[in-house]
Image (tube, rainbow, N blue to C red):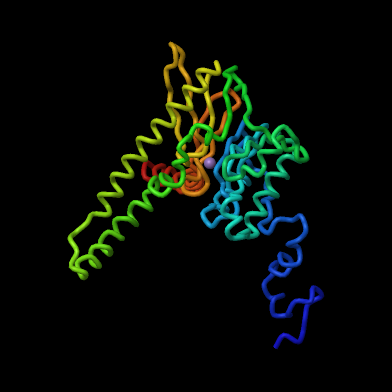
Amino acid sequence: MFDQTTPDGLPKEFAAFAGGVDNVSAFPSIEPSVPEPQDGKRRRFRTIWISDVHLGTKGCNAEMLIDFLDSTDSETMYLVGDIIDGWRLKKKFYWPAAHNDIVWRILKRSKRGTRIVYIPGNHDEVVRPFCGMNFGDVEIRRAAFHTTADGRRLMVLHGDEFDTVMLTHRWLAFVGDTAYHLMMALNQWVNKARTALGMPYWSLSKAAKHKVKNAVEFISKYEEIVARAAGERGVDGVVCGHIHTAEHRMFAHHGREIEYWNDGDWVEGCNALVEHFDGRMEILHWPDEIAKRETAPAAHDDAADDVRAVA
Ligand SMILES: [Mn+2]
């Protein structure tokens, strides 16, 4: 069946998948498996912050991030840690082509002139010894100070520095609604088994709810601690990641207002923090942005319908 081969040495049958063979043969080269769109329509920002991408894990929403990277551009981009998950990679090597595509796109951005600052987090702590060095044009830093267009000074760091108890793993499991609902479903299961074994009812979901409450308290406390640290450093605010919870909050510190920004993650939330050219900052929830983009033509049609109705 596979006696005829293409010039790449691949069975002829594979050539039927237009582009597929190219992808296979091009994999070790520098071209991404998902090509960058050539239309050049990108939303431009002064600054973009992303973190907690967790490349090398199944959790990473690579498809969403590729869409984000292909739809935006900025003068500066901060990679605020946990970009590559070294912890997970050590246990099991997982590196799909899409994860290469993300690295490729980030390096391409740098080539195009975006200043890239990579602040390693706790999951990519293997990169931390290289802080202060440059990898090509990518600056690797332990933390950074960013001045917004309107002159605010922001401290940029991953944020595990303030997670002293390293609650990361525990709360990560409970923050997501998905995990919570899974818990609820599991509850029925556990109790069916318990009943069968003649054991009394035990509420796993109640235990989960307690954990969720703890997680909410943990997040709130964490935000407060990070903002206080920024206040003590005399800056106007802080940008961090780590807890996978995109947020903007204001805190008072000795009569001064301190901004707390968390750029979220690309596992569940798919958030990025952006600074517009006037210094205004915004958290983008990328699935919402995609939905807006896709409903925009429909909204236009609705408007046309309205016009027709009036006429
Ligand atoms: Mn982290």
Residue 7 image offset from top left, x and y in percent:
82, 75
Q: Residue at 53%, 33% (x, y): give it.
A: 161
Q: Quadrant of the N terminus?
A: bottom right
Is residue 227 among what the camera can see? yes
Is residue 300 among what the camera can see? no
Q: Quadrant of residue 73?
A: top right
Q: Quadrant of residue 42?
A: top right
Q: Nearer the viewer, residue 145 or 114?
A: 145
Q: Nearer the viewer, residue 100 or 278?
A: 100
Q: Quadrant of the C terminus?
A: top left
| Residue furthest to the top | 255
Residue 40 image offset from top left, x and y in percent:
68, 44
Q: Is residue 91 above or below residue 152?
A: below
Residue 167 image offset from top left, x and y in percent:
44, 41
* Left or right of residue 230, residue 76 in this image: right
* Left or right of residue 220, residue 139 in this image: right
Q: Residue at 34%, 57% (x, y): give it.
A: 182
Q: Residue at 44%, 30% (x, y): give it.
A: 223
Residue 212 image offset from top left, x and y in percent:
33, 44
